Image (spheres, grey):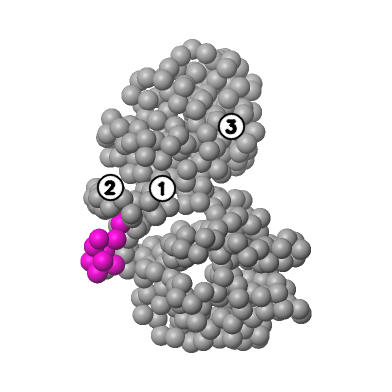
Amino acid sequence: MAEHLIGISLAMIVRDGAATLRDCLVSAAPFVDEMVVVDTGSTDGSLEIAKAMGANVIEMQWQDDFSLARNLSLDACRSPWVLVLDADERLSPPQSIKLMEALADNTIVGYYLNLHNLDSKGNVRSRAKLLRLFRNLSGVRFRFPIHEQISEALVDFAASHNLLIGDLPLDIVHTGYSELNLEKIERNLRLLEQAVLDTPEEPYLWYNLGKTLTHPLINHPDEAHLALERSRALLAGNLTLAARAAYRSSLYEFIVNNLIRLGWQEVALAMADEATILNGPSFEFSYLRGILLLGLGRPEEAINAFKDAIDQPSATAIWNGGDARRHLAFDGLGQALFRTGRFDEGLGFFREALAQSPEDATSRMNLAEALRTMGLVKEAMAEYMELIRIDPGMSAAWRNGAKILDAIGLTREATVWKMRAESSCQQE
């Protein structure tokens, strides 16, 4: 831990986090005065790791309430500032001078930090800004048994004391999204279903329930629609709640995407328009309008929507990692231009999408298909081969490459590619 007191307590809750806990504590130790770890029933050695690292370890029985555990950790913190991390996160080395300057600013009650969610390959899956460094204030505590939040309490405190919440360029790297975990998702669903029964007038809980029901491993779009609409209706009926709901744009994004899954494109388009009226122009809803207009056979209008998306700020980056998806607007614009016969322009935007996100398989497939449509078979074949390098099981890349090989008379090679396509399709 820090040799010289700098005024920060690390507050954590842990359960069976031994695989990553040591890295987390090592990353934070140079910048905190103490480490408080509340363990909710680990059986994998997490307790021993935390104790060996010098943490103040508090054991509690898990009671299906994340806020209860979080607040127990806050109660034990003695420093004037609190940093919150999870066991599967680590703090990138901050610049100590900037950190000290931030803590010395008497006008600030808390700071948003940059969270980078990594996939299984170590690539950034999404980015977000979360309120993880804040003053240790009596009475300012986490709320909600699941998807616990302290931000509203801090915002209220800041408003009532004429203080501010700032941004600090400190990075947290999160590896917990690297694998889909059905057990955790089902646990979250169970807690949320109980939470909305206990507090049915809380739109944030309905929002999270609907969001969880859209998860690919759950995938109940009809039930998700009901929950998301309940959240929307509660916000619409309470202007005070709506004004404080930082997640409102994210709620609308989930509503629109879920309506698309249900096949209700016209309703989804109207909802995207409503979101723009309520929250102002943004990347997310201009992009979604573009996708919907393309699907409705209105490519000229889609072109304008995608162009708007390219130039507009993200409305949901704090919640959904919106800025990490900006390349999709370039890809969408490429698709819309192709629909109107403007092939050369479209090709340029596909290439721009890949320049921003080289590993994006959808954009590369669209580029390959565009090149094949234009008769640029050599370039198209190079893109299919790159797709196969990224994902050897991508049946569409094998299948479309086989079409090119057939067309140029390489029958034997085409047969091999067709066999690979069939084999990959059986594995999908």
Q: Magenta includes 17?
A: no
Residue type at mark 3 is Ala
Residue 219 visible, this orientation:
no
Pointer 1 residue: 250
Q: Mark 3 or 2 closer to N-term?
A: 2
Q: Which mark is residue 420?
A: none
Q: CA distance from mark 1 to mark 2?
A: 15 Å
Residue type at mark 2 is Ala
Foreground mark, 1 or 2, reads: 2
Q: Is residue 124 placed above or below 17 in the rendered structure? A: above
Pointer 2 residue: 236
Check the picture and name the quadrant holding the N terminus: bottom right
Q: CA distance from mark 3 to mark 1?
A: 23 Å
Q: Mark 1 or 2 closer to N-term?
A: 2
Q: CA distance from mark 3 to mark 2?
A: 37 Å
Pointer 3 residue: 353
Foreground mark, 3 or 2, reads: 2
**Residue depicted at x 60% and y 76%:** 80
Magenta residues, start to end: 195-203
Q: Magenta includes 201?
A: yes
- The answer to which image quadrant residue 89 occupies is bottom right
